[in-house]
Amino acid sequence: MSFEPLLLSLRVSTIATFLVFFFAMFTARFFSKREFCGKDLIESFFLLPIVLPPTVVGFILLYLFNRNGLIGVILSDWFGIQVVFNWIGALIAAIVVAFPLMYQSAYAAFSSYDQKFENAALTMGASRFRVFWTIAFPLAWPGLLAGLVLTFARAIGEFGATLMLAGYIPGRTDTVPMTIYFAVQSGNNRLAAIWTGILVILGYSAVLWLNLWSKKKMLKYKRN
Amino acid sequence: MLRLKLFKQLAQFNLDLKVEMGNEIVVLYGPSGSGKTTVLNCIAGLDHPDKGLIQLNDIRFYQTKMRALPLSKREVGYLFQDYALFPHMNVLKNIMYGAKQEKLVIRVIDTLAISQLKTKYPHQISGGEKQRVALARALATEPKVLLLDEPFSNLDQQLKKECYRSLMELYRIWGIPIILVTHDYEEARKLGHFIYHIDQGKVIKREKMSVNSIVANEFMA
């Protein structure tokens, strides 16, 4: 049994989580602070991957990222990057499906504490940059962390959109969920069960750790 | 000298107010929802008037049709109604957040007798202690004007007396303009050099308090 699928899944989900965390956090921060025309339209667009079937998301991504697609042609011609049937396809699929989860968690996290703390910091002469990193970020951290764990879990478990965009090429795009699916298809239930067990342990550990950490850290201070 | 000339359309009424003060304690006294906190927010830069002038000495915070001075440059100390102490920082970190010199922080902490609280978190201290910590935090930034939004409203009578004393002691040392918002007339009478009675966003009466009625003299005699 090769551990290649696990390594690929970890690589894809770690990079996706890292990128999604920062992008969704700053986007959510901006959207939680500003009111402007068209905000609801853009937010609904962000959340679309939650309501669409993964195959539909995958099809849209395939349309955009294939070699002649709107984005694919730019990536291919300008940067020599091929997304389809490549692990980068799996990465893009993971980013797109996980983004709404992180966005929603971050938005809720930044709206969960009283604005007065930031106002107090601003009146003390702090720059907005400093207010973000010393007040907003720590106060929103429990919610951000929950989003981070959800993002990672969603990214590592991504299947439908990945299959559409990256396909199943052993040694190249075979993430764990994909390996499980094709193992079952080929009648290798034992292999599917092993990988299922590994994913269950990974997911359970992440949620358990989050719960334990939350209990320990979030009780350190009470919200005023 | 702090000059305020504010006009702002609010949901229920128009805020229309003019105040000029030196290094005194001016009390904005009036019922809840009369626009008092909006005045403080406009001075601090958390809110803007629709038109008017806010000027401290020769620094213009706001003038109609001119770009407002960013709030981080106003050097205003603001004590919020429920203190807004940062819950994830201990008392010392709260006070140090906007502090300019450590020496001053030590002096403020000593004056307010809160040195035993330095390592505690806001949820671990009492209402009166929070009030003093918030006052220390506001003063540690070396403000040119101090804004106090109903700072004593959650305290019992004994604590209020102690806090009045602390405030007057700090006023004696700092000698900066202080604007205090309250809906407690007794408090206004005890602390203010001038009391502006505010109702529906307008000054309906201005009282100059006789020196003898000021708590400062009461306590410092």
Image (spheres, helix red, strand yellow):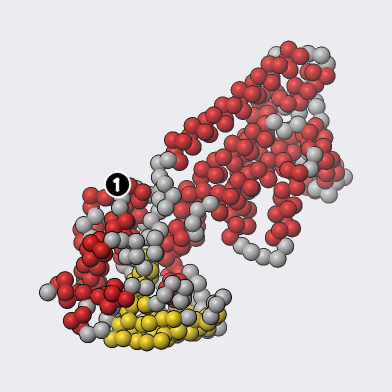
The disc numbered 1 marks a residue on which chain?
A: B
Report the residue marked by disc 1.
B119
Residue at 79% x, 18% y is A184
The answer to whether residue A214 of the structure is visible from this angle is yes
Question: Residue B160 location in percent, x, y?
Answer: 26, 64
Residue in the picture at 68% in, 45% down: A100
Q: Quadrant of the N terminus of chain B?
A: bottom left
Quarter of the view holding residue A59: top right
Q: Position of residue B55 (x, y in %)?
A: 41, 82
Q: Residue at x 73, y 53 (%)?
A: A44
Dot 1: what SS? loop
Three-letter amino acid code at the position of disc 1: Thr
**Residue B7 higher or lower than B165, as above or below:** below
A7 relative to B221, above or below: above
Structural crowding at the residue carrying mark 1, measured as other residues with C-alpha within 10 Å and reported as few (<14), some (14–19) or many (≥20): few
* Rendering coords of residue A55 (x, y %): 82, 37
Q: Residue at x 37, y 73 (%)?
A: B183
Please state the horizontal and vertical placement of residue B15, each as a whole percent of the image.
49, 81
Q: Quadrant of residue A167?
A: top right
Residue B66 lies, with reference to residue B103, above or below; the image says: below
Q: Is residue B29 left or right of residue A10?
A: left
Give the quarter of the figure containing the C terminus of chain B: bottom left
Which image quadrant for residue A122? bottom left
